[in-house]
């Protein structure tokens, strides 16, 4: 059975253009419309009957698009999902969870079936290939995350750049001069995932501004001992660490202590993570909270306004909130 992507390929247009030709929601040239109609006829494509029947009506369902790619911390992602679901229910909407890595084709398929009223998209990359389609789709959308250019989009998230800066500035106030960022797994940076890149930018900028020596170390969740040994070998004067890798937090503190460094007497540790995780570590960690509940709720609220035709801001950045705990202290000068 032919799909809308097959029609788009045959006609030499994007899937969203085929969708517009079928729905009439946006004007397209007569020449383009003819190419689409010819492709539909040649391939025997038939638009989804449910989509035609539901045209112009609400389904009261939101789609949460969160591809479960390698390197993501699923428990943290699910905190965002729970917030989206519980907030959507307050607006009498259900949530369809889409976890496959389907890119543009998946978004187009969901839009064309009229199963959902709007989209919430997570795991946003700086140059996300889904962005052109999201800008063109007739369905309203909100991104949890900030691509390199958010023009024409609605985005909400923690200000991860400011979060990275806050961790470094806290260590600088305590007198630390050599710091390291233990970050997300390498594949997260290879994909140019927006939040991870923003943390690196903030960490590096603040360290430079404060005259500190700094390094960045992507790290697999099971490599705590290896990265601790590498840091002490390459930065023997290290006294401050920022962790942006949830499953690594407790193992990394343990690894440093096994190598002879006491937290915080010899080494101060900060993190960007959920509060409950920071509090659960044997030495409670000073951290910038990951406000999953607030971000998920804001995303749904923005969508509800868009569905009602109310103007919303393109960018909603939540300021970082740091809580000092037992893992940080003043640098001791020997």
Image (cartoon, rainbow, N blue to C red):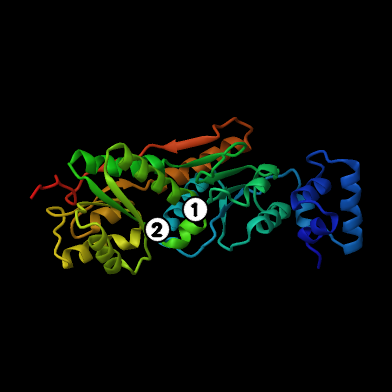
Q: Give the camera-side residue of 32 and 302.
A: 32
Question: Dividing the picture into quarters, in which one does residue 250 lie?
Answer: bottom left
Question: Could you tell whether 134 is left or right of 178 in the image?
Answer: right
Residue 255, position as x, y percentages in the image: 22, 66
- Foreground residue, 168 or 64? 168
Q: Is residue 332 above or below residue 2?
A: above
Q: Quadrant of the N terminus?
A: bottom right
| Element class at badge 2 | loop
Residue at image coords 53%, 40%: 155
Q: Earlier in the sequence, mark 2 or mark 1?
A: 2
Q: Are marks 2 and 1 in contact (CB under 8 Å)?
A: yes
Q: How many marks?
A: 2
Position of residue 276 in the picture relative to residue 35 (left or right) = left
x%, y% of residue 299? 51, 43
Measuring from the top left, give residue 283's x and y in whole percent.
18, 57
The residue beneath circle 1 is 193
**Taking 34 as reference, is 26 above or below it?**
above
Q: Which residue is mark 2?
A: 184
Q: Is residue 147 left or right of residue 118?
A: left
Distance from the alpha carbon under mark 2 to that under mark 1: 10 Å
Q: Residue at x 29, y 59 (%)?
A: 249
Q: Which secondary structure lies at badge 1?
A: loop
């Amino acid at each position: 059975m032919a799909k809308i992507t097959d029609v788009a390929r045959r006609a030499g247009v994007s899937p969203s253009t085929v969708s517009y030709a079928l729905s009439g929601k946006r004007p397209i040239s007569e020449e383009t419309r003819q190419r689409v109609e010819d492709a539909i006829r040649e391939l025997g494509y038939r638009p989804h009957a449910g989509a035609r029947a539901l045209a112009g009506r609400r389904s009261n369902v939101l789609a949460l698009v969160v591809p479960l790619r390698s390197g993501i911390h699923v428990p943290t992602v699910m905190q965002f999902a729970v917030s989206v679901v519980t907030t959507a229910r307050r607006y009498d909407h259900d949530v369809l969870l889409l976890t496959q890595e389907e890119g543009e084709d998946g978004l187009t398929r969901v839009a064309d079936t009229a199963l959902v009223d709007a989209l919430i998209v997570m795991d946003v990359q700086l140059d996300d290939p889904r962005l052109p389609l999201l800008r063109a789709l007739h369905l309203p959308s909100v991104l949890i995350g900030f691509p390199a250019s958010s023009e024409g989009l609605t985005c909400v998230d923690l200000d991860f750049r400011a979060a990275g800066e806050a961790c470094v500035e806290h260590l600088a106030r305590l007198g630390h001069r050599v710091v390291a960022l233990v970050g997300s797994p390498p594949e997260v940076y290879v994909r140019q995932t927006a939040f991870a890149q923003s943390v690196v930018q903030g960490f590096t900028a603040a360290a430079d501004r404060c005259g500190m020596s700094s390094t960045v170390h992507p790290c697999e969740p099971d490599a705590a001992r290896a990265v601790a040994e590498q840091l002490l070998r390459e930065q023997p004067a290290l006294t401050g660490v920022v962790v942006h890798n949830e499953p690594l937090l407790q193992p990394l503190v343990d690894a440093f202590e096994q190598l002879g460094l006491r937290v915080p007497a010899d080494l101060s540790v900060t993190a960007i993570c959920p509060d409950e995780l920071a509090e659960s570590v044997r030495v409670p960690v000073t951290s910038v909270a990951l406000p999953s509940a607030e971000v998920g709720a804001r995303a749904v609220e923005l969508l509800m306004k868009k569905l009602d035709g109310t103007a919303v801001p393109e960018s909603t950045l939540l300021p970082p909130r740091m809580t000092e705990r037992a893992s940080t202290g003043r640098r001791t000068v020997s």
